Image (tube, rainbow, N blue to C red):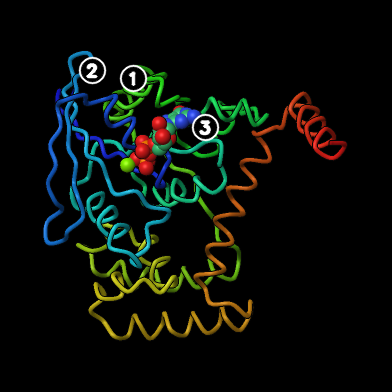
Amino acid sequence: MKRKITVALAGNPNSGKTTIFNNLTGARQHVGNYPGVTVEKKEGACRHGDVDINVVDLPGTYSLTAYSIEELVARDFIVEEKPDVVVDIVDSSNLERNLYLAVQFMELGVPLVLAFNMSDMVKARGYEFNLPKLSGLLGAPIVPTVGHKGQGMEELLDAVVATAQRTATRKSAFIGYGKEIEEELRKIEPLVARDEALAGRYGARWLAVKLLENDKNVREMISSPDVLDVVRQSESRIEGIFGDPPELVITDRRYGFISGACQESVRSTVEARHTMSDRIDSVVTN
Ligand code: GDP
Ligand code: MG
């Protein structure tokens, strides 16, 4: 039983991350920088039951690519510091877009809790979630929260502590990329697995996906030019088949996975559709 855990708060900009960070840590926080960069690092502390929780506020990001310093900082922190739990603050009133980041945490295989923040807006917009179903499809616990009202914080901490104490590794959802991409991944994976230290840290599949996504930072980690040759050949095969570079095809598949999960577990309420069309009618008739 761990008495001290580290939790990383992640999420898209404006998802309510700072609000929830403040709710959790109150005055117990301090600000510094991530090493070597000017990205602000806020840390705070709280206690839940008999567990001391160190909360680290990651930079707000839409993705985890190597294209921006914020995304790289978030990714490096998770891989290098291995927080016990990553809490992804999701603006659940804008679900599909926000789940894109969540899917990338799943691919990294980190212990994940999803805070479905802005859940007051969800009702107002006429959506209803089947949370047990969605949680099963995504392979992570989901806690509805209303950040600015402080709602759901105890439940969020319950889920965080339970996830940190889980000894059996919970299986994250598996995102398949379709026959053609999977075929190329099968060629690249065993090659990157030869570097045991690297593969141990990131996972061979994750590295292979990132290489196909043309991730500059991951490319620089690969010392063997032969591996990069194989990746280049895979890229041109994919581009030949789809007419798009692999990173676009991979992005499409991630959204496909999200959209499939949402179709099964999100419904628009009839009343909301009525209010919406009533409103449109009154706008039109006025
Ligand atoms: P951040 O960019 O992720 O750090 O987002 P902030 O914490 O700064 O929140 C952005 C805005 O959303 C602020 O005006 C918050 O008061 C508001 N907010 C936070 N949580 C909720 C929520 O659950 N519902 C609603 N309606 N607004 C929220
Ligand atoms: Mg903020």
Q: Label 1's element?
A: helix
In the rendered structure, which amino acid carries the disc numbered 2? His
In the rendered structure, which amino acid carries the disc numbered 3? Ser
User: Residue at 51% of width from left, 39% of height from top?
Assistant: 138
Left or right relative to 141: residue 220: left
Q: Position of residue 174 (x, y in %)?
A: 50, 49
Residue under numbered circle 3: 135
Indicate which disc residue 158 carries. 1
Tell me: residue 86, above or below residue 33. above
Tell me whether the residue at label 1 lies in contact with that at label 2, contact meaning CB atoms closer than 8 angstroms. yes
* Quarter of the figure that contains the N terminus: top left
Q: Position of residue 264 (x, y in %)?
A: 67, 37
Left or right relative to 269: residue 113: left
Labels 2, 3: front one: 2
Residue under numbered circle 2: 48
Upstream in sequence: badge 2 or badge 3: 2
Q: Residue furthest front?
A: 286
User: Residue at 61% of width from left, 29% of height from top?
Assistant: 129
Tell me whether the residue at label 2 lies in contact with that at label 3, contact meaning CB atoms closer than 8 angstroms. no
Upstream in sequence: badge 1 or badge 3: 3
Upstream in sequence: badge 1 or badge 2: 2
Q: Quadrant of ligand 2?
A: top left
